[in-house]
Image (spheres, helix red, strand yellow):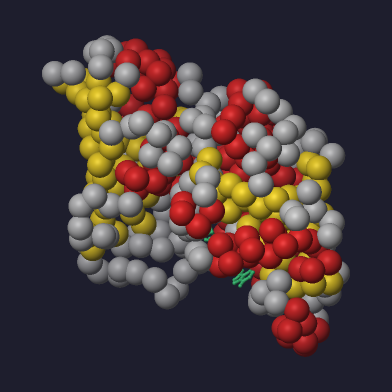
Amino acid sequence: MKSVGVNGYGTIGKRVADAVSCQDDMKIVGVTKRTPDFEAQMAVQNGYPLYISAPEREGLFEEAGISVKGTINDLHDMVDIMVDCTPEGIGAQNMEVYKEKGIKGIFQGGEKQEAIGHSFNSFTNFKDAWGADYVRVVSCNTTGLCRTLKPIDDLCGIKKVRAVMVRRGADPGQVKKGPINAIVPNPPTVPSHHGPDVQTVMYDLNIITMALLVPTTLMHQHNLMVELESVPSIDEVIDTLEATPRVMLFEANRGAGSTAEIMEYAREMGRPRSDLFEIAVWKESINVDEGELFYMQAIHQESDVVPENVDCIRAMLEMEEDPDKSITKTNKAMGIVG
Ligand code: NAD
């Protein structure tokens, strides 16, 4: 049983903590918070040993009546690996501390590839993280692109990908981000960073992406145009995606024609926090024309990277050599389809 710590019990961190807790080969030995907010309170209520990530702020937790087990320095001594889920840029700073302490670290997509040195997706390069010390799980958008592009590449070979990403302006709980009433090319330059990010885990893929921010909080949405080496039938593509773990096909004509309805489906599934760990592909959008494949998909940004964090732990701690076995094990424990 491997001991895992989560540094930063926020949107991603609390989900990673729950996902690790339901596996039978790893356990959470502690989570950290910097601020004594309701998430810190919930961490304690959920039974996670809570540690303060900024020891000088201990008094704030005392004032708030939130009991902590110690500081992050105590937690460092207890873990086989730290899953760092702190805000963008903080993880890279923390990596230096993990190095000093001799502990392994997983980082999230907000960290730069150059800062961490190696990136991960369960389906594309699991084995390259075998025994590694510091690895970054690619972002929610990149994870979504990899989940569907990898099986398509395996089916018929990809010549090149062009994708337009419609990104949520903020997560549901974020009140200080936007836009509220605008469509914002983000970045206004082409390509966006998403294509190069995919290339950190699908090394030879020819991909260019463009991205927009829109006033929604529920999901990201992607529009893909994929030139292929060999031309499959639409049914072959549908069969391939239906057989792909962590991908779900939705039909607009069965009431799932929008991100709002897909998230309503996730609520009906009774998942914790209404999460949809799977990538949602609209079945009707799949089309093949003159050797080019078209499809549309949606990404639940708060949760899709979470199972990848679990697989990444297994690869880095040399717990399971076969990616398919890790993916199946993670999925089964988390109730993920496929
Ligand atoms: P978040 O703000 O929801 O949570 C971050 C947590 O870290 C909070 O609990 C906060 O209190 C804590 N924290 C803040 N400063 C800290 C510090 N200096 N040291 C330790 N802890 C600190 O952020 P998030 O959305 O969970 O994002 C975390 C990482 O995951 C980022 O790299 C982000 O880019 C990436 N990511 C986010 C999403 C998403 O849609 N939210 C999706 C995929 C990847």
Residue 169, percent from left and from top: 35, 62
Q: Which quarter of the rendering shows the N terminus?
A: top right
Side of 133 where 286 appears, left or right = left
Image check: 292 left or right of 262? left
Instruction: Give the quadrant of the C terminus.
Output: top right
Q: Where residue 74 sits: x, y (%)?
A: 83, 66
Q: Is residue 32 above or below residue 287?
A: below
Side of 304 where 75 appears, left or right: right
Task: Examine the rendering and report whether any part of residue 259 can be seen.
Answer: no
Relative to 278, is 186 above or below?
A: below
- Corner quadrant of residue 5: bottom right
**Which residue is located at x 58 percent, y 62 percent?**
91
Q: Which residue is drawn at 41% across and 27% down?
A: 150
Residue shown at the point (58%, 47%) measured from the top left: 135
Count the labels in the image. Answer: 0
Residue 87 placed where, x, y %?
54, 66
Residue at 80% across, 62% down:
75
Q: Residue furthest left?
A: 290
Decide which of 64, 75 is in the foreground and name it: 75
Look at the image and tell me whether residue 201 can be seen.
yes
In which quadrant of this rendering is ligand 1 seen?
Answer: bottom right
On screen, 338 above or below 168? above
Q: In which quarter of the image is residue 72?
A: bottom right
